[in-house]
Image (spheres, helix red, strand yellow):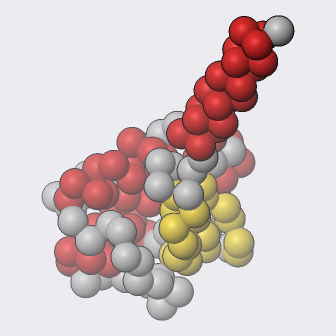
Amino acid sequence: MKKLVMTAIAAVMLIAGVTAALADTYLGSYVARIGENDHYASDGYLLDTAAQMVRQDRANFHKFGVYDAEDENDSWFGDYDTRAWLEKALNRKSAMNNATRKAIVNGFPLVQVDVYQNSVKVTIIGY
């Protein structure tokens, strides 16, 4: 009986630890217009993916001082390495749905980017 109780306690502790490790802490959000300038890389070529365009929006904002009126500042993507992480996170299927990806690639939507410790989530909030 004692062994069974100890095994049950160990299992609960393991599940709690795994759940805590999987928790993705919300850090904040920003709003940005994915404008025409965001569809092009810094050296002028047309970008292919929504992830690249959202990353370029942050490079334009932080590095080049090129931004749309609706673009907000953020506390996370001011340097190359964090923007590289952003693009990688945006390429995950859970970062945005297909309709959002298409809207970014084919137009100039207003988006909200929710930033978490281990991920990001992009939502269209206007056109």
Residue lying farthest front? Answer: 2
Q: Is residue 119 above or below residue 32?
A: above
Q: Is residue 43 above or below residue 73?
A: above
Residue lying farthest right? Answer: 1
Please identify the quadrant where the N terminus is shown. top right
User: Which residue is at the front of the view, 34 or 78?
Assistant: 78
Q: Give the image location of residue 29, x and y in percent.
A: 55, 72
Residue lying farthest left? Answer: 43
Residue 11 at least partly seen? no
State the residue at coordinates (58%, 35%): 17
Drawn side of residue 116 relative to residue 112, left or right:
left
Q: Give the image location of residue 33, x and y in percent.
A: 52, 75
User: Which residue is at the front of the view, 1 or 109?
Assistant: 1
Q: Give the image location of residue 109, x and y in percent.
A: 61, 69
User: Which residue is at the front of the view, 90 or 18?
Assistant: 18
State the residue at coordinates (34%, 62%): 56
Please identify the quadrant where the C terminus is shown. bottom right
The quadrant in which residue 93 appears is: top right
Drawn side of residue 33 relative to residue 83, left or right:
right
State the residue at coordinates (47%, 84%): 72
Q: Give the image location of residue 16, x and y in percent.
A: 66, 36
Q: Is residue 43 above or below residue 127?
A: above
Residue 21 at least partly seen? yes
Drawn side of residue 72 relative to residue 98, left or right:
left
